[in-house]
Image: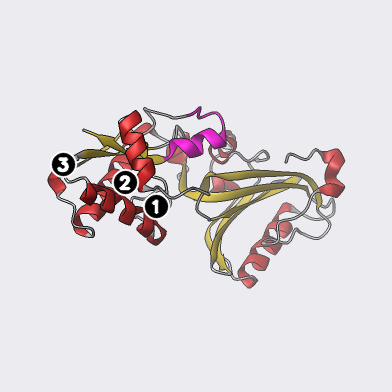
């Protein structure tokens, strides 16, 4: 849902962060499940976007809100109020910067390119924070410029996804020689397998035990966002983690498994949409 300034009365705040009193909401975008770049550091001498803004990649449901600042309040006052409110609400500040601390004025546009935020300036104030509410991790990014400010929320939840079945594995290998291993989840931007992947791994292991002559490749894939070399390494590490779990936890002979990563080189769908990128982030089993 994208909201224009004319629809401001219809814009609802996110319950995790209360809007600064007197602010006028002008836009809300519910981006759904995606990878979000949370700025956690600034290198003032860097020449590239990637080096200039150090980021933490977090995956979850993303909400972006934009507000007009109250005319009688300074950006510093608004920013300070948000920071105090977040800390009182249980958020831990991961990073904060003001004006020159946020990088040189000539490079302020990199904030838009890296974060996707719409409003930024050389006089801005920014913070990144994290909290756990009702057992759910929540990240907040707030950027306050001279006339406007933005509040962006990431609710970390696994993408809705089915659980791989023995039937799906068999049919996929028979018809295409490969199958997507649904139900395997990783820590954000890491190769650490989440506990909720247990059922999927058990199903995969049992299928391999039921077909003792089958040897396979475990292949990791990423979407097209981010640096190529990083995605290539991440996809390889995730595939290796799955193969290691099948071997060490479930007793599958390592000689039957090979693990490889192809990064963004073999997409299932376009990377131009979040739905497409979500399908491109996956682990597959390929018969060999």
> Which residue does the numbered mark 1 point to in the structure image?
186
Please indicate whether residue 50 sits to the left or right of residue 233 in the image.
Answer: right
Is disc 2 placed on a helix, strand or loop? helix
Numbered mark located on residue 213 in the image: 3
Q: Are marks 1 and 2 in contact (CB under 8 Å)?
A: yes
In-front residue for pair 113/107: 113
Numbered mark located on residue 238 in the image: 2
Q: Residue at x 34, y 41 (%)?
A: 169
Is disc 3 placed on a helix, strand or loop? loop
Q: Residue at x 84, y 45 (%)?
A: 8
Please indicate whether residue 257 sits to the left or right of residue 31 in the image.
Answer: left
Stretch of the chain drawn in magenta: 269-281
Q: Where is residue 13 shown, x and y percent of the image?
A: 75, 55
On whether residue 274 falls in the magenta region, the answer is: yes
Model colouring: secondary structure
Please indicate whether residue 34 sits to the left or right of residue 184 in the image.
Answer: right
Q: Are marks 3 and 1 in contact (CB under 8 Å)?
A: no
Q: Where is residue 235 shown, x and y percent of the image?
A: 33, 40
Can residue 45 be seen in this snapshot?
no
């Amino acid at each position: 849902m994208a909201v224009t300034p004319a629809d401001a009365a219809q814009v609802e705040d996110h319950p995790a962060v209360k809007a600064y009193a007197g602010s006028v909401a002008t836009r809300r975008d519910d981006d759904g499940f995606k990878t979000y770049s949370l700025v956690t550091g600034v290198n003032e001498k860097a020449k590239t976007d990637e080096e200039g803004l150090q980021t933490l990649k977090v995956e979850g449901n993303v909400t972006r809100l934009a507000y007009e600042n109250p005319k009688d309040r300074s950006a510093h006052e608004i920013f300070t109020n948000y920071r105090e409110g977040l800390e009182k609400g249980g958020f831990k500040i991961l990073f904060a910067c003001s004006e020159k601390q946020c990088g040189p004025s000539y490079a302020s546009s990199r904030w838009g390119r890296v974060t996707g935020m719409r409003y930024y300036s050389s006089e801005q104030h920014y913070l990144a924070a994290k909290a756990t509410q009702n057992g759910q991790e929540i990240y907040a990014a707030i950027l306050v410029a001279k006339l406007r400010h933005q509040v962006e929320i990431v609710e970390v939840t696994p993408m809705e996804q089915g659980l791989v079945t023995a039937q799906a594995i068999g049919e996929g290998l028979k018809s295409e020689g490969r199958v997507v291993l649904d139900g395997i989840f990783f820590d954000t931007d890491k190769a650490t397998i989440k506990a909720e992947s247990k059922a999927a791994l058990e199903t995969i292991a049992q299928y391999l035990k039921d077909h003792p002559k089958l040897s396979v490749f475990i292949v990791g894939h990423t979407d097209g966002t981010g640096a190529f070399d990083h995605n290539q390494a991440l996809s390889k590490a995730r595939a290796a983690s799955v193969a290691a779990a099948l071997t060490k936890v479930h007793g599958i002979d390592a000689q039957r498994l090979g693990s490889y990563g192809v990064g963004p080189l073999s997409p299932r769908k376009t990377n131009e949409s979040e739905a497409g990128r979500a399908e491109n982030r996956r682990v597959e089993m390929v018969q060999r």
